[in-house]
Image: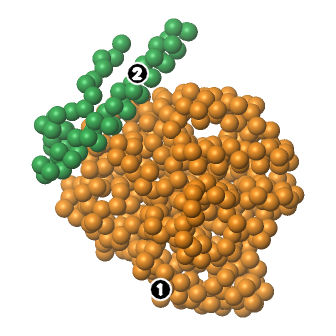
Chain colours: A orange, B green
């Protein structure tokens, strides 16, 4: 594979090519920069691209390899970073005019760990202003388009990270996830999106750390495991030890009561059939506090982001876009009692889920109630986070979850599947995701890791095809 | 039993809350903010009901 193709494959293949001398870090980074130059004027995945820094780091990585110093599987791998995670010497804007020229002195801890592991930071990816807003005319960079169907905006807030990986501008990206912001774009762009357990990865971002974690977006679950191992200082799981037979909890009462789009619901039920055929046991469960936990997460989030950005609101009011201003002001109307109630509801939801996990290994739900960003942002629904009903409750209680690609899409946009595990069981999530990736892509379930052959055609090519007639189609 | 607060706040109430935190908002922003405030207050009131009922059940089971 040439460097350009490697960027659309996976970290494992690129690392093998680097170690075998079939490519170099400089060639990989150069190919990524070329693709960014070609595609990003339309896609808007990046706020800032570090051309010189990335090439200089790549040359150093190649020097180390020539001297026989391999830092690990991320050595020489280009990775993109969401632009709300500070990067030393590289401007960090939050896609806000208020931070248009801020150059941090220190890396976010997860970024520092990636650099130590040999990864090459290629640039900073686009997001809704401060990660908690919706696109507005005053954003530094316009919102990213979804490469799978450029008539749609990519869902946020880690939208740029998703676009960068799915279109081959980087082999992985860090996002953040305070209500689903890593898992939602992963689902919509045929990627794996891992939201780790609260505290598993150091964040150091502020009050919002109570809900928001650093997330990982990659092409495969194996890649997610590699990146997660680096930023959490964990071991990479042993794939052969993956679960043979698992019990999956399905919250049937909530799925029947919630307004889930038909395409999403039919994709979910087909995926459950595929998982059952692959040996999983499906168990009906009840999550009576699910929607309350969603509301609690967003009430608490409003209070926390207000606390974190109150100084920005006082000192840079006019430089912050109106959408972001409003969403960061709302929290001022909440009290400590409101926050206490939200946390109490979180405890109720956690008790529900803990009881389920006494007899299930994982919970499985759709990632979102809707397939498109426009549907997620319908008036009256976006403010309340209705599209994030299945993802946001896990932020409230800090449990890990993962979005896994499937064969389904709606209006050209992929639809993922969402699994939840007990705290600190990221290895189980990742092992299971690897073991069922073939089944979810409509293939025979193999005993080993997912084959690269299961990866679809490049999304850029796919996106150049006209939107398929009808909906709920499967990827070919 | 906690007293249930009214859902939503008036523009002047919101302005007062913001000014107490050192923030002066433009009139256009204030009016655009009110629907968001109403949404979050509705959610907060729902959470208060759920939490109050749960605490009351916890209390009666002791």
- Identify the residue at horizontal 77%, vertical 71% (top origin): A453
Per the model, the C-alpha gap separating discs 2 and 1 is 53 Å
- Indicate the quadrant containing the N terminus of chain A: top left, top right, bottom left or bottom right: bottom right
Of labels 2 and 1, the one closer to you: 1
x and y, in percent, of residue A194 in the image: 61, 56
x and y, in percent, of residue A17 in the image: 74, 84
Asked if labels 2 and 1 share a chain, the reply is no
Q: Residues within 10 Å of mark 2 (few under 14, many from 20)?
A: some
x and y, in percent, of residue A30 in the image: 57, 89
Q: Is residue A111 visible?
A: no
Q: Residues within 10 Å of mark 1 (few under 14, many from 20)?
A: few
Q: Quadrant of residue A237?
A: bottom right
Q: Is residue B14 visible?
A: yes
Q: Which residue occupies the extreme front position in the image?
A: A469
Asked which secondary structure carries label 2, the reply is helix
Residue on which the image places disc 2: B49
- Write down the chain letter for disc 1: A
- Indicate the quadrant containing the C terminus of chain A: top left, top right, bottom left or bottom right: bottom right
- Residue A322 or residue A145, whichever sits in front: A145
- Identify the residue at horizontal 76%, vertical 58% (top origin): A442
- Residue A193 or residue A112, whichever sits in front: A193
Residue A37: mark: 1
The answer to whether residue A252 is left or right of residue A85 is right
The answer to whether residue A99 is left or right of residue A80 is left
Residue A87: mark: none
x and y, in percent, of residue A222 in the image: 72, 64
In this view, A445 is above or below A368: below
């Amino acid at each position: 594979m040439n460097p350009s193709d490697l960027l659309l494959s996976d970290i494992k293949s690129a690392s093998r090519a680097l170690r075998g001398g079939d490519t170099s870090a400089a060639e990989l980074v150069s190919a990524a920069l070329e693709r960014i130059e070609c595609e990003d004027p339309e896609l808007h995945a990046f706020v800032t691209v570090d051309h010189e820094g990335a090439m200089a780091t790549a040359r150093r990585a190649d020097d180390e390899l020539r001297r026989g110093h391999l830092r690990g599987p991320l050595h020489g791998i280009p990775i993109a970073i969401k632009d709300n995670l500070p990067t030393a010497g590289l401007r960090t804007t939050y896609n806000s005019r208020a931070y248009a020229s801020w150059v941090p002195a220190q890396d976010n801890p997860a970024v520092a760990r990636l650099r130590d592991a040999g990864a090459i930071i290629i640039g900073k990816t686009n997001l809704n202003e401060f990660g908690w807003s919706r696109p507005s005319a005053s954003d530094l960079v316009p919102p990213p388009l979804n490469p799978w169907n450029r008539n749609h905006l990519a869902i946020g807030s880690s939208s740029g990270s998703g676009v960068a990986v799915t279109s081959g501008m980087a082999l992985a990206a860090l996002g953040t996830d305070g209500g689903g912001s890593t898992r939602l774009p992963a689902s919509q762009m045929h990627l794996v999106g891992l939201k780790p357990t609260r505290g598993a990865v150091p964040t150091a971002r502020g009050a919002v750390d109570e809900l928001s974690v650093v997330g990982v977006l990659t092409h495969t679950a194996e890649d997610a495991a590699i990146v997660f191992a680096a930023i959490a200082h964990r071991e990479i799981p042993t794939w052969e030890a993956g679960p043979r037979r698992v019990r999956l909890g399905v919250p049937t009462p909530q799925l029947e009561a919630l307004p889930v789009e038909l395409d999403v619901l039919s994709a979910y039920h087909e995926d459950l059939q595929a998982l059952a055929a692959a040996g999983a046991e499906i168990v009906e469960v009840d999550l009576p506090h699910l929607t309350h936990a969603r509301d609690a997460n967003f009430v608490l989030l409003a209070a926390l982001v207000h606390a974190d950005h109150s100084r920005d609101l006082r000192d840079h009011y006019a430089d912050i876009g109106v959408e972001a201003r409003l969403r960061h002001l709302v929290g001022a109307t909440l009290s400590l009692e409101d926050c206490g109630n939200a946390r109490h509801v979180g405890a109720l939801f956690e008790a529900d889920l803990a009881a389920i996990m006494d007899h299930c290994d994982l919970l499985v739900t759709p990632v979102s109630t809707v397939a498109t960003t426009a549907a997620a942002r319908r008036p009256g629904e976006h403010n309340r986070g209705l599209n994030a009903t299945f993802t946001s409750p896990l932020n409230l209680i800090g449990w890990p979850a993962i979005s896994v690609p499937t064969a389904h899409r709606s209006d050209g946009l992929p639809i993922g599947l969402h699994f939840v595990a007990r705290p600190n069981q990221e290895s189980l999530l990742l092992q299971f995701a690897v073991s069922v990736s073939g089944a979810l892509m409509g293939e025979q379930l193999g005993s080993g890791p997912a084959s690269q052959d299961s990866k679809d055609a490049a999304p850029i090519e796919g996106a150049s095809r006209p939107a398929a007639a009808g909906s709920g189609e499967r990827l070919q | 039993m906690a007293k249930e607060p009214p859902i939503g706040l008036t523009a002047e109430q919101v302005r007062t809350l913001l000014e107490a935190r050192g923030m002066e908002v433009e009139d256009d922003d204030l009016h655009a903010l009110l629907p968001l405030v109403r949404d979050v207050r509705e959610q907060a009131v729902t959470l208060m009901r759920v939490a109050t009922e749960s605490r009351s059940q916890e209390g009666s089971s002791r």
